[in-house]
Amino acid sequence: MSYPISMIPYANMAPYRQLGAPAGCHFISLLPRESVAALKKRSVLAAAVPVGGLFTLGDLVEPLGPFGIAAKERSMSVLFYSRKPLDRFGPHDRVRLTTDSASSVRLLYLLLGGLNGFDRLPKLAPDNADMAVDGELVIGNKALVWAWRIETCPGVQAGPRPAELTLVTDLASEWFAREGLPFVFARWVVRRDAPGAVKATLRSWMARFAREEDRLVRQAVPIAAREMCAPEPAVIRYFEVIRRRLTAPDLAGQARFEALFRRHERAPLFAPLPPNGRG
């Protein structure tokens, strides 16, 4: 029997993919938000899930050691493109948000609310490319492609970068400036009810990754560069920014994020734009 493990198809997970699936397991390509749903349904037993998704998973999962995706001072792949700075956004502005991950949306919510007040958040525009917005949150390969100004790239559904969104804010940078802590975007977790042998195999797989990380990162560079039509030096810089083995400051940053979000959580985080299209 082969057990399903979720694997996010972003460049930041490329070094993990280079190791291959753990013994007796196979990868299923899922976006971050899809991984959360798959864990709930038990259609996968383990995944690197967005930390924002951990709120809904609760005690269903447990961490697979200090492994995930974290960034200190900048992420390069969680970017907010806008017409104006974050501290000038208000309830009459319109934003378009990624639907791929809960962590980045919750982070933007906390940053905008902390700067301008949680009663003065912009409205959520529909996912309609024809509607002009004041800001757009993009993550993963799409964010990298936009940042590197690559307009067409096979396999990456990035689309052209809107010319009017001239300001670029790295949300990890904003978080670090505010909290003085790194931001953890994803954590490797396993379902608590997974067979003991599967848990042991996954922990052994993680330990092997830790031993071979440098080699795996080097191997992943040309592959990720080809997938995004990007220059290898740019991919190398990105892999140097992203951390896959989490440190004590990383975990402190995750705990701070969870505490702040629980304090300010509301539903929906961003109110939808009224039918007349005005905030």
Image: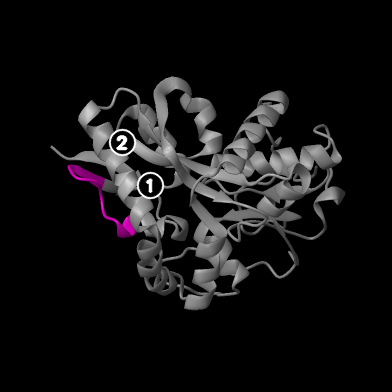
Q: Position of residue 55 (x, y in %)?
A: 54, 27
Q: Position of residue 93 (x, y in %)?
A: 80, 48
* Secondary structure character of the magenta stretch overall: loop
Task: Indicate yes or no whether the magenta region holds residue 230.
Answer: no
Instruction: Please name the residue shown 21% across and 31% down the image.
Output: 197
- Residue 193, label in figure: none
Residue 198 in view, yes or no: yes
Q: Which residue is mark 2?
A: 44
Q: Is residue 137 above or below residue 146?
A: above
Q: Which residues are magenta?
A: 17-26
Instruction: Please name the residue shown 80% across and 33% down the image.
Output: 118
> Are there few (<14), some (14-19), or many (20+) residues within 10 Å of tag 1?
some
**Circles 2 and 1 in contact, beta carbons < 8 Å:** yes
Q: Say left or right for 228 vs 211.
A: right
> Are there few (<14), some (14-19), or many (20+) residues within 10 Å of tag 2?
many
Q: Which residue is mark 1?
A: 30
Q: Amino acid at mark 1?
A: Leu
Instruction: Please name the residue shown 38% across and 28% down the image.
Output: 40
Instruction: Please name the residue shown 70% across and 54% down the image.
Output: 173
Front in this rendered view, residue 199 or 57? 199
Front in this rendered view, residue 121 or 2? 2
Q: Amino acid at mark 2?
A: Val
Q: Quadrant of residue 64?
A: top left
Q: Say left or right for 244 vs 132.
A: left
Residue 122 in view, yes or no: no
